[in-house]
Image: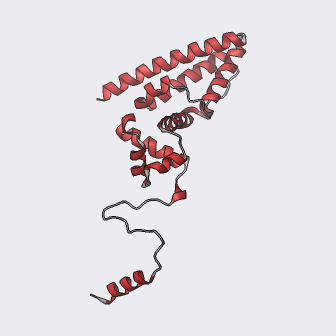
Amino acid sequence: MDMETNALESAAASEPKKRGSKPAPAGSVARKPRDSLNRSVIIEAGLAIVKREGLSGLTFQALGDELGAHATSVYRHFRDKDELLLEIIDSLRENSYGSDLVATGDWRADLRIMATQIRDHYLRYAPFAHEMSLRSTHRKTEFVNVEFALDALDRANLSPDDAVIYLRLIGNYVRAMSSFEASVTCQQLL
């Protein structure tokens, strides 16, 4: 043995061992420190997995592998896969049109802007489009979008009850058609 190897071995031997710590098995991935995970880091990892492997690849085990953490550590931040998926969808919406919905004063133009933003969003994230069209996230970006549309419909002089009905009608139509167009786009890529 050379002197450098001896010095390293004796330094390692003189360090106090942590109680209950075991050496990592050969070939294992070092885990991240306990406090290094947060919701946004997990959402980004989930998004990377879904882009790479599709929605079926999004499991807590895959997240743990992606993050270099134990799969159960994700449960400290998300109740289940569905909650994580809703957060991913809302995050994608925020990235697409979160701050772009600004009222113009013309209710028709505002509804057109909203419909165009939703369509562009579905086409940008075509693999998610079907899942997004079926789900109500009950999260911040969705609420902002709903309030924007209701404000436009109010300026169209609809009663509150009629505004809600037309909001559902317009929203369902735009999401359905955008989802369909996105699925056609995905099929053309295959």
Question: In this rendering, does residue 162 appear at all?
Answer: yes
Residue 33 versus residue 148: which sits nearer the camera? 33
Residue 147 versus residue 24: which sits nearer the camera? 24
Identify the coloring. secondary structure
Question: Which residue is drawn at the image coordinates 70% and 10% (left, top)?
Answer: 158
Residue 140 versus residue 81: which sits nearer the camera? 81
Viewed as shown, does residue 109 lie left or right of 51? Answer: right
Q: Quadrant of residue 147?
A: top right
Picture coordinates of residue 64 (x, y %)? 42, 50
- Kindly give the residue lying farthest to the bottom in the view shown: 3
Question: Which residue is drawn at the image coordinates 43% and 49% (left, top)?
Answer: 71
Viewed as shown, does residue 127 lie left or right of 113? Answer: left
Q: Quadrant of residue 26?
A: bottom left
Question: In this rendering, does residue 106 appear at all?
Answer: no
- Kindly give the residue lying farthest to the front in the view shown: 20
Viewed as shown, does residue 129 lie left or right of 1? Answer: right
Residue 168 versus residue 117: which sits nearer the camera? 168
Question: Which residue is drawn at the image coordinates 55% and 57% (left, top)?
Answer: 35
**Placement of the N terminus among the 4 image quadrants:** bottom left
**Placement of the C terminus among the 4 image quadrants:** top left
Q: Quadrant of residue 148?
A: top right
Picture layout, residue 36 above or below residue 168: below
Count of numbered marks: 0
Picture layout, residue 64 above or below residue 134: below
Picture coordinates of residue 143 (x, y %)? 64, 28
Picture coordinates of residue 183 (x, y %)? 38, 23
